[in-house]
Image (cartoon, rainbow, N blue to C red):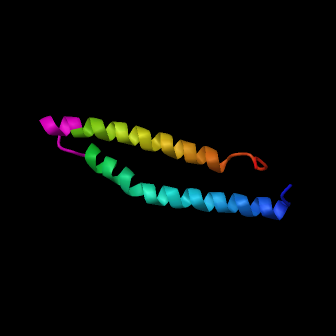
Amino acid sequence: MPTEAESNAKTLELIEEIEEITKRFQPIEHLFDVMGAADSGVQGVFVRRWAEIGMHLAATFREYLDLLAAAPKGKD
């Protein structure tokens, strides 16, 4: 059974990994933001719909990362 210090170190490591994943994911979110601001012309409608899908997927992914970060300790 891990000590409290080991458990705290693992939790800190997990939080750091989640922060790194989030940081690396931000350019994708920015791409969807830009796509969502596309001109509403014929092609723009499709791009904006893809952006909506992308933003939904990004939000779902962030929710999942938040769940990982909030997972109860001691699940080794």
Corner quadrant of residue 6:
bottom right
Q: Would residue 42 be counted in the magenta stretch?
A: yes
Say if residue 41 shows up in the picture. no
Q: Is residue 17 left or right of residue 61?
A: right
Residue lying at the far left of the rendered structure = 42
Q: Is residue 14 visible?
A: yes
Query: Closest to the observer: 38 or 66?
Result: 66
Residue at the image point whose x is 32% and y is 48% from the top: 33
Q: Is residue 69 above or below residue 60?
A: below
| Residue 56 image point, x, y percent | 41, 38
Residue at the image position 21 percent from the left and 35 percent from the top: 46
Whether residue 48 sits left or right of residue 63 in the image: it is left
Name the residue located 47 percent from the left edge and 60 percent from the top edge.
23
Task: Judge left or right: residue 13 versus residue 57.
Answer: right
Residue 20 locus on image (x, y percent): 52, 61
The percent position of residue 31, horizontal first and vertical second, equals 31, 52
Q: Which residue is found at the position 28% from the left and 35% from the top?
A: 49
Residue 20 horizontal side relative to residue 52, left or right? right
Q: Quadrant of the N terminus?
A: bottom right
Which portion, as a residue range, is magenta?
Answer: 37-46
71 is within the stretch colored magenta: no
Total marks placed:
0
| Residue 18 position in % (x across, y down) | 57, 56
